[in-house]
Image (cartoon, grey):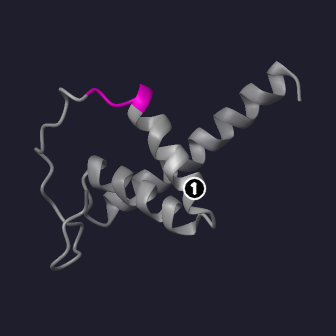
Amino acid sequence: MDKLEQDALQDCVRGIIEKCVASLIAVGCSNETALRLLMIQGAIRMNDAAEVRSVIKSIESGLIDDDDDEDEDDDHCGLEGERLG
């Protein structure tokens, strides 16, 4: 796959994810909760626990700023009794 095809695929995937997030927001989730739900559901659907840990490690090592742990998003997206995240 060349760079142009990779870019097109990435754009397509981003569009799908944006539609999923928008759909979750439409049913009452905040943006952060929608993103958490996608991460959780993705991890649940992975068959290999080691692969889930690998993804988590990758996220922790480069994408999360530990100083950005503000918990301003406290909604539950209509899920009673269960805090997301």
Q: Position of residue 73 (x, y in %)?
A: 15, 49
- Image quadrant holding the N terminus, namely top right
Q: Residue furthest bottom?
A: 80
The residue sitting at the top extreme is: 3
Direction from residue 26 to residue 67 in the image, left or right: left
On the picture, is 21 further left or further right than 79?
Answer: right
Whole-percent x and y of residue 8? 75, 31
Circle 1 sits on which residue? 50
Q: Secondary structure at mark 1?
A: helix
Q: Residue at x 50, y 60 (%)?
A: 43
Residue 83 lies in what quarter of the image? bottom left
Tell me which corner region of the image, top left, top right, bottom left or bottom right, holds residue 36.
Answer: bottom left
Q: Is residue 41 above or below residue 61?
A: below
**Magenta stretch in the rendered image:** 61-65
User: In this view of the protein, which residue sits in the foreground, 52 or 31?
Assistant: 52
Say which residue appears at 22% left-offset and 73% top-offset: 78
Nearest the eye: 84 or 19:
84
Is residue 80 part of the magenta span, yes or no?
A: no
Q: Is residue 82 found left or right of 62 in the rendered image?
A: left
- In the image, what residue occupies the spot 48% across and 56% down? 20
The count of marks equals 1
Residue 2 horizontal/vertical position (percent): 88, 23
Furthest toward the right, the residue is 1
Predominant SS of the magenta segment:
loop
Q: Nearer the viewer, residue 65 or 6?
A: 65
Q: Is residue 81 above or below residue 43?
A: below
Using the image as rendered, state which of residue 23 and residue 83 is in the foreground: 83
Image location (x, y in percent) of residue 63: 40, 29
Q: Which image quarter is the C terminus in?
A: bottom left
Instruction: Say whether residue 62 is magenta.
Output: yes
Q: What's under tag 1, amino acid-wise?
A: Ala
